[in-house]
Image (spheres, rainbow, N blue to C red):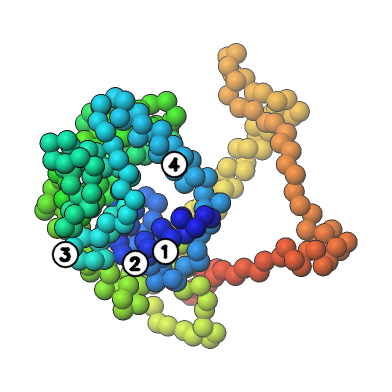
Amino acid sequence: MNIQRSEFLAGRKAGIGGSDIAAIVGLSKFRTPYDVWADKTGASEPESDDDKPWLYWGQVLEDVVAREYGLRTGAKVQRVNAQLIYPDWDRAIANIDRAVVNPDISGNVRWKDGRLTTDRILECKTANGFAASLWGPDGSDEIPETYLCQVQWYMGITGASHADLAVLIGGNDYRTYTIEAHSDLFADLMTEAQAFWKLVENGIAPDPQTVADAQARWPQHLASKSIMAGGSVARAVDDLAELKERMSEMKAQEDALKLQVMSAMGDAEILEDMGSPIATWKTQTADRLDGKALRKDHPDIATLYTKSTSTRVLRLKSRKD
């Protein structure tokens, strides 16, 4: 990770940014409120950008998308190389992709008296082709809720009245969206953000929204600690046991059907019906590290590359009549 990137991430921990707000209000498909809380409080392990190639390519293609926006609209865009802090609450921060120059207001865009000297900002995105259905027609304001929260947050902080969002979908589908600022929505986001930041300051974790949240919040058990189940939790255990039983039955049915198809295919690669392929059964080869042999032949090397991990496993106990 380069120094500039690490400084950006460190600064982002000091407040709530555009990539945080949708998660805080429960509208992000990528993060939960607990994820944001753990990041701000240092309760989570720092993540490496090396494991997220989409972040790298998103940064690389940001310039491409911004340039295409300028070519198609004729607008001049400008970087604002600063973290913008909302003057009415210094925990609300914005790191916008570009400002759009409005020559009727000023020349180069500046951050002056807690506002940008322009009325329009630009966010540049890339999206997987499989996500195309989440985006509305080119020229509309129909964007995913995650990004809607982000641009409303940025407009509220910067004072811009409009945000253009340019996106390259699937590498060849370019679209531009224009979103108008809504002060009431920004006020609602601000209320949620301030309530959330009190949890950060007081070290109080938000309620888990996913199994992964629960695993992260309570990674270790206390030996021999026992609690009494309330009525709703006891019913949840019973429902879970019933669901697992049904899933086990469905797995057995799935295996029986697979066996029937495989037995019919034998060593054939393709199964056809009326001249059209309806199934394939192909050999797949993958390289796999033989850890047992490595530990036997080179124990010192194996020790260097062995990482111990632990996780809590939920198991249901059968009830006795």
Mark 2 vs 4, N-terminal side: 2
The answer to whether 198 is drawn above or below residue 111 in the figure is: below
Compared across the picture, whether 265 is left or right of 300 comes to: left
Q: Are marks 2 and 1 in contact (CB under 8 Å)?
A: yes
Q: Residue at x 24, y 66 (%)?
A: 90
Per the image, the residue denoted by label 4 is 58
Q: Which residue is at 71% across, 65% downward? A: 306
Residue 226 location (% of width, % of height): 47, 84
Secondary structure found at label 4: helix
**Image location of residue 48, percent across then percent down:** 53, 57
Helix, strand or loop at mark 2: loop
Badge 3 element:
loop
Decide: marks 1, 3 in contact (CB < 8 A)? no
Give the Cα distance between marks 2 and 4.
23 Å
Amino acid type, residue under disc 4 in the picture: Gly
Q: Residue at x 40, y 39 (%)?
A: 62
- Determine which residue is flagged by label 2: 14
Crowding at mark 1 (Cα within 10 Å: few <14, some 14-19, many 20+): few
181 to 48, vertically: above or below: above
Residue 60 in percent (x, y) is at: 46, 40
Q: Answer with mark 4 or mark 1, whichever residue precedes in sequence.
A: 1
Q: Mark 3 sits on what residue? A: 88
